[in-house]
Image (spheres, helix red, strand yellow):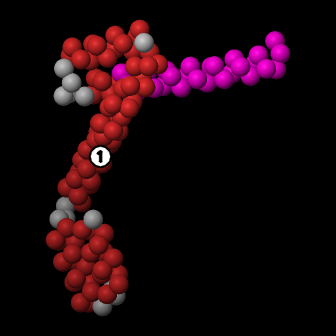
Amino acid sequence: MSFWESLGWMLWATVFIGYLFALFAIIADLFRDHKLSGWLKAVWVFFLLFLPILTALVYLVARGEGMTERGTRPARDAEKAAESYIREVAGKSPSEEIAAAAALLEAGAISEDEFAALKLKVLS
C-alpha cells in the first residue's frame, strides 16, 4: 500500500468517524426532543438509515439551533440544582450573607471594595 492510499484510507476513516459522531448526536437529540411526535422521530430515523448524509445535513440545518438548546438545557438545570443545594446546605440566604458582610464592614474588618465584591458575588 502506497503512501497516498494510506492517506486516503485515513481521510475516509476520519470522515466516517465524524459522520458516526453526528449520527449519534442526531439520534440522541431526536429522543431528547419531547415536542416531536413518535412518528416524526421514526421518519427521521428511517431517512437517516437510507439517505444518511443528506438527512444528517438537512437535520443539522433545520434543527441545529434547537439541538444546541436541548443539549445545554440539562447542564444548566444540573448547575442550578447544584447551586440551590449548596445554598441550602450552607444555610444562609443571600440577604443573610449581605447582612453578615455589612456587619463586617461596620466593624471595620473589611473595606468598601471587599463589601461590594462580596455583595456582587452573593447576588450573582
- Residue at the (22%, 71%) spot, across then down: 97
Q: Is residue 109 visible?
A: no
Query: What range is drawn magenta here?
Result: 1-27
Residue at the right extreme? 2
Left or right: where 75 falls relative to 39: right
The secondary structure type at the circle numbered 1 is helix
Nearest the viewer among 16 and 119 is 16
Q: Say if the magenta span includes residue 78.
A: no
Left or right: where 13 falls relative to 31: right
Nearest the viewer among 118 and 38 is 38
Give the quadrant of the C terminus: bottom left
Q: Say if the magenta span includes residue 10.
A: yes
How many numbered marks appear? 1
- Residue at the (25%, 28%) spot, across then down: 33
Instruction: Tell me which secondary structure the magenta stretch mostly adopts.
Output: helix
Nearest the viewer among 64 and 78 is 64
Vertical side of 13 occupied by 87: above or below: below
Q: Position of residue 61 (x, y in %)?
A: 38, 32
Left or right: where 2 falls relative to 50: right
Rendering quarter of residue 72 = top left
Give the quadrant of the N terminus: top right
Q: Can residue 95 be seen in this view?
A: yes
Rendering quarter of residue 96 = bottom left
Amino acid type indicated by mark 1 = Arg
- Residue at the (76%, 18%) spot, across then down: 6
Q: Name the residue under label 1.
A: 76
- Residue at the (21%, 24%) spot, across then down: 36
Q: Where is residue 34 in the image (x, y as percent from the top left)?
A: 20, 27
Vertical side of 49 occupied by 111: above or below: below
Left or right: where 107 falls relative to 5: left
